[in-house]
C-alpha cells in the first residue's frame, strides 16, 4: 500500500509546492494554498509489482454495439444546448453564480425526464431532503417519481445507485461536486484532490454502467468553475448558467460539448413557478426598445446556431476628467477601445475627450466580433445626437484599417430580422461573386469601410466634437 505524504496544493489552479506560501506562484492568487495528503509518487520504471492486464482493441467500423438514443427532457432550450438531449454514459458539468437557478433548472429537467420513464436519482450534498422537497413543492413537481437522497460519500452513493432496484439508474445528478468526498483521501471536501478523485470515480462508474451524470459546480469570484481545471477536461459537456440578478431571464451557455455544437445558448425566464422557456429571445430583448433615441442600434447576433436580435446602447458625453471613463456592460472592453481608436483615426471623429458608456440591453453578453458594426453605429449616433432608423439592423466585423469584414451565417441573421419586421440591414459588402444574402422582404446596404457608415446616416459637417 502506498504511503501518504503531505503536500501543499493551490485550491484555485491545482499547483503543488513543498511548502506553504501566502500567494500561489502559478496563478498569483492569495490564501489559496492548503495542506493535503497525497499518495507517494511511484518512481519511473516501476509499476508497483502489478502486471497490467491485456485490453481489447476494436476497429472504427465495429458496429456490434447498438447506438443509444438521447434522453429528451422536454425542455427545448435545455435540449438545444446539450445538442438534442442527454447522451447515455455522458458526464455534464454545469456551473453558475450562487442563487442563479442551477438547482431549480436541474430539478425541473430531472422531473421532466422521470415522467417519460427515465429512472433518475437526485443526490444533494448541500441541502437536506426536506429542503429539496420544498423546492419541488413550490414548482409543482412533488408527485414526480424521482429518487432523492442527501449524501456526500462517493462510495456510499455509487453503492446505493447499484442497488437502486430492478431498474438500472439512467441519470444521476450530483449537487454539487465540491461537497463530495472519497474516504480514503485525507483532505477536506472541496479541495483539489477530493474534487478530482470524486469526479473521476463517479465518471468511471457512470460510463461503465452507461449512466448519464450531471455535476453542479461552484464558481469562483471570476466566474470560473472552482476546483482543478482538469475537471472540465474529464467531463463531456460544460455548461455555464449566467444572468444578471436585476433581470428576470437566464442564459444557459454551452462552453464544451463532445456530442453537439459549442457556444449554443438556451434562454429562460425566472418566474414564480420556476424557469420558463423563452421561445423568441429577440422579441424579449427588444420589447422595451425606443427607436427614436440616439445611441441605439439593433445587432443581429448569432449564438451557436441561433440568430438573436439585441439592442446596443451607447452614450458619449463630454468629460471633465483627465482620463475619460470607458464603461462597458455585456461586451469586451478591449474591443470597444479598438472601435473608438478606429473611429478617431479612420473617420476623424473626436471621441478621446469624451466619457463613453456602452451597454447590451437586457443583461446578455455578446462575444462575437460581428457586433463591431452595431457598436460603431451606436457610438456615432450618440456622438451626433441623431437617432438611427428604427427598422434597421447591423452586423459586421471592423478591422484596424477601418474595413468592414464579412461574418458567418449572414442569411440566418437576415431571416431573423425579417421575421421581426425589420426592413433594412447594414451589412459588410459581399465580395464573392454569385452569392446573395439579401431576402425579398428586407433591403440590404453593403459597406466596405467604416467611413461609409458615418456618411450613410450623418453629415460630417454637423459633427459636434468633444474636445478634452
Image (spheres, grey):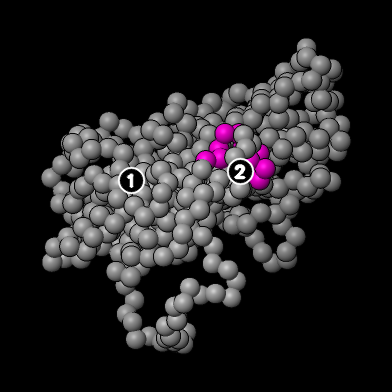
Dot 2: element:
loop
Dot 1: element:
strand
Q: Residues within 10 Å of mark 2 (few under 14, many from 20)?
A: few
Q: Which residue is mark 1?
A: 175
At 21% from the left and 47% from the top, the residue drawn is 149
Query: Dividing the image into 4 quarters, which one contains the N terminus?
Result: bottom left
Can you tell which of label 1 and label 2 is closer to the viewer?
Answer: 2
Residue 327 is at least partly visible in this image: yes
At 45% from the left and 63% from the top, the residue drawn is 2
Query: Dividing the image into 4 quarters, which one contains the C terminus?
Result: top right
Q: Which residue is mark 2?
A: 19
**Boundaries of the magenta span:** 24-34
In the orientation shown, which residue stands out farthest toward the top? Answer: 320
Residue in front for this viewpoint, 196 or 148: 196
Q: Residues within 10 Å of mark 1 (few under 14, many from 20)?
A: many
At 71% from the left and 26% from the top, the residue drawn is 326
> How many angstroms separate mark 1 from mark 2 (CA)?
33 Å
Q: Is residue 138 above or below residue 183?
A: above
Amino acid at each position: 500500500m502506498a504511503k501518504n505524504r503531505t503536500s501543499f496544493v493551490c485550491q484555485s489552479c491545482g499547483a503543488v509546492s513543498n511548502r506553504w506560501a501566502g500567494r500561489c506562484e502559478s496563478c498569483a492568487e492569495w490564501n489559496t494554498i492548503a495542506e493535503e495528503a497525497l499518495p507517494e509518487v511511484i518512481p519511473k520504471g516501476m509499476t508497483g509489482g502489478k502486471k497490467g492486464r491485456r485490453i481489447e482493441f476494436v476497429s472504427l467500423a465495429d458496429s456490434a454495439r447498438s447506438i443509444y438514443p438521447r434522453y429528451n427532457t422536454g425542455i427545448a432550450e435545455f435540449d438545444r444546448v446539450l445538442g438534442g438531449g442527454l447522451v447515455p454514459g455522458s458526464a455534464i458539468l454545469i456551473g453558475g453564480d450562487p442563487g442563479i437557478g442551477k438547482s431549480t433548472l436541474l430539478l425541473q429537467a430531472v422531473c421532466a425526464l422521470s415522467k417519460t420513464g427515465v429512472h433518475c436519482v437526485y443526490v444533494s450534498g448541500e441541502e437536506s431532503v426536506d429542503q429539496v422537497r420544498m423546492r419541488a413543492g413550490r414548482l409543482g413537481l412533488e408527485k414526480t417519481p424521482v429518487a432523492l437522497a442527501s449524501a456526500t460519500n462517493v462510495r456510499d452513493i455509487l453503492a446505493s445507485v447499484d442497488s437502486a432496484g430492478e431498474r438500472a439508474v439512467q441519470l444521476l445528478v450530483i449537487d454539487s461536486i465540491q461537497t463530495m468526498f472519497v474516504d480514503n483521501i485525507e483532505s477536506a471536501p472541496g479541495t483539489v484532490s477530493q474534487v478530482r478523485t470524486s469526479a473521476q470515480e463517479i465518471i468511471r462508474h457512470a460510463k461503465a454502467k452507461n449512466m448519464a451524470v450531471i455535476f453542479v459546480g461552484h464558481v469562483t469570484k471570476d466566474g470560473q468553475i472552482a476546483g482543478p481545471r482538469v475537471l472540465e477536461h474529464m467531463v463531456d459537456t460544460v455548461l455555464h448558467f449566467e444572468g444578471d440578478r436585476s433581470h428576470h431571464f437566464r442564459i444557459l451557455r454551452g462552453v464544451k460539448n463532445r456530442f453537439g455544437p459549442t457556444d449554443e445558448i438556451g434562454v429562460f425566464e425566472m418566474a414564480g413557478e420556476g424557469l420558463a422557456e423563452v421561445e423568441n429571445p429577440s422579441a424579449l430583448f427588444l420589447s422595451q426598445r425606443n427607436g427614436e433615441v440616439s445611441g441605439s442600434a439593433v445587432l443581429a447576433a448569432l449564438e451557436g446556431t441561433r440568430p438573436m436580435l439585441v439592442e446596443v446602447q451607447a452614450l458619449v458625453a463630454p468629460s471633465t476628467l483627465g482620463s475619460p471613463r470607458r464603461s462597458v456592460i455585456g461586451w469586451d472592453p478591449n474591443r470597444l477601445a479598438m472601435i473608438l481608436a478606429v473611429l478617431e483615426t479612420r473617420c476623424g471623429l473626436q471621441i478621446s475627450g469624451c466619457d463613453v458608456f456602452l451597454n447590451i440591453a437586457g443583461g446578455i453578453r455578446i462575444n462575437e466580433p460581428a457586433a463591431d458594426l452595431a457598436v460603431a453605429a451606436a457610438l456615432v449616433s450618440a456622438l451626433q445626437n441623431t437617432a438611427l432608423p428604427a427598422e434597421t439592423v447591423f452586423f459586421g466585423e471592423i478591422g484596424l484599417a477601418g474595413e468592414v469584414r464579412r461574418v458567418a451565417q449572414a442569411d440566418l441573421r437576415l431571416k431573423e430580422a425579417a421575421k421581426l419586421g425589420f426592413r433594412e440591414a447594414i451589412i459588410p459588402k459581399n465580395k464573392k461573386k454569385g452569392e446573395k444574402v439579401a431576402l425579398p422582404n428586407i433591403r440590404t446596404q453593403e459597406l466596405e469601410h467604416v467611413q461609409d457608415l458615418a456618411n450613410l446616416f450623418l453629415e460630417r459637417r454637423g459633427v459636434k466634437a468633444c474636445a478634452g
